[in-house]
Amino acid sequence: MKKFGIFLLEIKEYILLALLVCISLYLLFRNDNSQVRFLRAVAVTTLGTFQSGISLIPNVFEIENENKFLREANIKLSNEIASLKEMKSENLRLISMLDFKNRVSLPLVSARIINKSLIQTRNTITIDAGESDGITPNMPVITDEGLVGRVVLTSGKFSIVQILLNDDLKITVKNQRTRIDGILYYDGMGNLMVKNILKNADVNPGDIFITSEYSSYFPSGIPVGITAEVGNLDNLFKKIVLTPSVNFESIEEAFVLKYQPVQEKLELENTYKK
């Protein structure tokens, strides 16, 4: 108690000041003099402005936190939209592939493309299907758009596919409209060509070329490309450039066609060549 009394004596000036301020404020607000009213209005305005300024400080932090939350929410929504678009695109591709699979009489093995090269002279793709799926070398690889190439190497779960844009792959083809035969090949510089077609042959831009019945490794009738350019290679033959039926830049899935050529035919032709 003695300590409390000493403490009060030490702050008696502050207590007295606070008491006088309270009395002054009371008298000020009780006085209705015009000058006092003016001072009171100024005081209230000043206090209100000060409080308004103080109140903005927490609002700034609140707005910043809200903006951060909205940015994060926007990123999440953008990712979800992108994911939904990808799922829709994949579903459309799979529906198209399923419809194509139902229309093809020969057995098919569906596969995803997990690697590919398009800038070499010997371009290939890698698919996630192999010997465990019954795939063997020389089986054709196709999509609903047309011919991709043929399997050249297999392992248990994967296969390497030699695509049309590979200068080692030569395929006998024919013009679907005029039935004129030629040899499909890749010139190594980005062009899919057809050779051995005579200069006076009926070939026009827009004509579709398909695999022919003379092919050793592919069934006939598979689209390989659309004629983009027709010219003269020399005095005897035409220069024919095709646009591939398959878009190799965007291809993501394909089918391996479980097709094997007639061995008796191959053996007979190989024996003759020897």
Image (tube, rainbow, N blue to C red):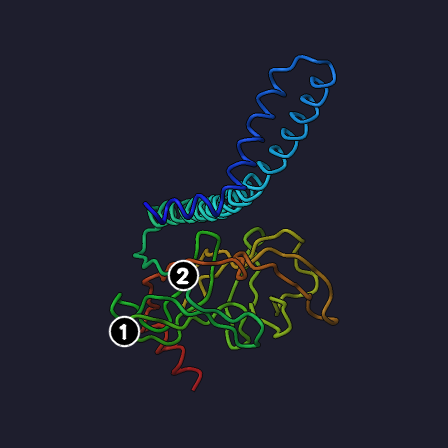
Q: Residue at x 48, y 61 (%)?
A: 211
Q: Nearer the viewer, mark 2 or mark 1?
A: 1
Residue 62 vertical position relative to residue 270 in the rendered view, above or below: above
Residue labelled with disc 1 = 156
User: Residue 181, position in %: x, y?
Assistant: 55, 63
Bin the neighbour count of mark 2 within 10 Å (Cα to Cα): few under 14, some 14-19, many 20 and up: some
| Residue wearing tag 2 | 219
The answer to whether residue 51 is visible is: yes
Tell me which residue sits at (63%, 66%) in the image: 197
Left or right of 203, for residue 211: left
Q: Position of residue 61 (x, y in %)?
A: 54, 44
Give the answer, above or below, for where 8 lies relative to 193. Answer: above
Residue 231 coordinates in the image, percent (x, y): 73, 63
Question: Which residue is nearer to you in this view: 116 or 261?
Answer: 116
| Label 2 to label 1: alpha-carbon separation | 25 Å
Q: Position of residue 258 (x, y in %)?
A: 32, 62
Q: Is residue 40 above or below residue 88?
A: above
**In which quadrant of the rendered image does the N terminus lie?**
top left
